[in-house]
Image (cartoon, rainbow, N blue to C red):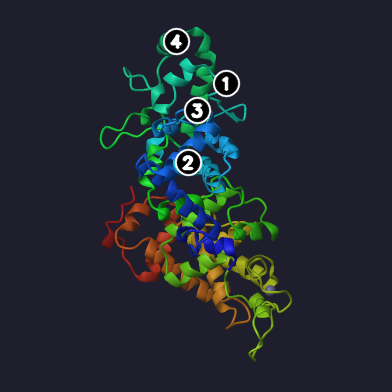
Amino acid sequence: MKKETAELPTNMGGLAAPNLKNFWDSLKLAWLSRLFQTNDAATWKRLAMSRLSFALRLPKLTLTRLLTEGPTSIAKASAAISNPFWQSLWKLLPKLEKTFYNKYPKATGERIVWDNDDFLCEGQPFSRRSNSRILTLNFNFIHEFVSPKTKVLMSEEEATALLGVRLIPIWNKLVESITAHLTSKNLTWYSIDKPATGPIHWGWSRLVTECHKARKFYPLLMTRPGDPIRNSNERAWTFSGLTHYNATRWDQLYQNQSNLRCSLRVKWEEYRVLWGRQELNRYRSRYANQGGDMSTACSYCREEIETEIHLYVECDISREFWQAARSWYTRNIGVSPPIVLTGPLLFGLEKEQPQDLCNIFYRSARYCIFKNRKKTFTPSLRYFIALVKDELRLKYRANRILKFANKPEEAKAVAWLRAQMGWLATDLNWPKKS
Ligand SMILES: [Zn+2]
């Protein structure tokens, strides 16, 4: 396994192996919480605060004041700090703040709108320094944009009463940027109210108090928001020709994989196909010769290297089988899944539920191809039919069949299964023909 894959959290298919750099960073970040908890008289704390005060050009900097300062301005100022430990720590603040509040979207109201990468104006964070003090004092936190009267975003009149007319254009830009951010997180202005219970937080105080242990910082650092390619497996699939899969499609596939309810041996192989980790012959080149068949060639055609793409998409013998299986499926189940595109043959249709009839087809055919390759010269249609029957029994088990009985697109599949199982329509309160 590659290092990057191993480091992914288990719910994304990794082993959650530690990343040493982030591990050390998270140990450092525990000092952030210590800074806030230690007695003000402690020498190290006075030193750290006076360095930061100088760097930020904020005389008599207090912790309360520090918490109201935007993360990017602190990170930028830290370049002027000579102590490499604190410098590297403050540089991590923007990333940390962003990841932390992405995990707690309900606390968005506490965030600072100034000098924050999540709130941009023409690609740059709004700068506190270059804006009027009356604006930055009245509107520092997101929740301050909420009207105390209406509990949603205040009207321009209310804002004008606080700021005067001159600052309204920039106020509107702030509102626009916050609204865009809220929308991207599936939030609305209704979500931004002060929490009714619990301690009151502001700025990044929640981050500091809730992450007082290094092990809490570590998962935050391991979350990489917005990476276009999130793991080496997606990259490998891209290189092998699946260039049209983006983050959304991959996420839908992972989602489907985790929602998949079917025989566990099939589910496990489905997982391995998605991660390009099936025990196919191509791996034999990596093993020491232990006698027996060491060929990396396709088990069916013996002509090409047995990779996932060859086995499920390109192999002539598999192709013949896909067609035979599809004809059978059309006749008996009443659905004709397309077999031209590479993606569905490898992973099924990510936009459909795992129990969708097309997905049952793709999954059963894949498992049949995989399982039969050591036993027969071509994948066995009988084996495929048995797999389809298992899947449909699970899908229509107990009274779930009633849910599908009225759907015309499922009628044929339901009838086929009933005939196979010897179930009578009357046993199921079958809807009468009118
Ligand atoms: Zn082949």
Q: Residue 130 carries which label?
A: 1
- The answer to which of marks 1 and 2 sits earlier in the sequence is 2
- The answer to which of marks 2 and 3 sits earlier in the sequence is 2
The answer to the question of whether label 4 and label 1 lie on touching residues, with beta carbons closer than 8 A, is no
Element under disc 3? loop
Tell me the CA gap for discs 2 and 3: 14 Å
Tell me the CA gap for discs 4 and 1: 20 Å
Indicate the amino acid at tag 1.
Ser
**Disc 4 designates what residue?**
160
The answer to the question of whether label 3 and label 1 lie on touching residues, with beta carbons closer than 8 A, is no
Indicate the amino acid at tag 2.
Ala
Percent coordinates x, y for residue 91 in the rendering: 55, 43
- The answer to which of marks 4 and 2 sits earlier in the sequence is 2
Tell me: is circle 3 under 8 Å from ligand 1. Answer: no
The answer to the question of whether label 4 and label 2 lie on touching residues, with beta carbons closer than 8 A, is no
Percent coordinates x, y for residue 363 in the rendering: 52, 64
Q: Residue 48 carries which label?
A: 2
Indicate the amino acid at tag 3.
Leu
Element under disc 2? helix
Tell me the CA gap for discs 4 and 3: 29 Å
Residue 320 sits above or below residue 288 on the image:
above
Image quadrant where residue 232 sits: bottom right
Mark 3 crowd level (few <14, some 14–19, many ≥20, 10 Å Cα): few
Tell me the CA gap for discs 3 and 1: 15 Å
Image quarter where the N terminus lies is bottom right
* Foreground: disc 4 or disc 3: 3
Q: Residue 58 carries which label?
A: 3
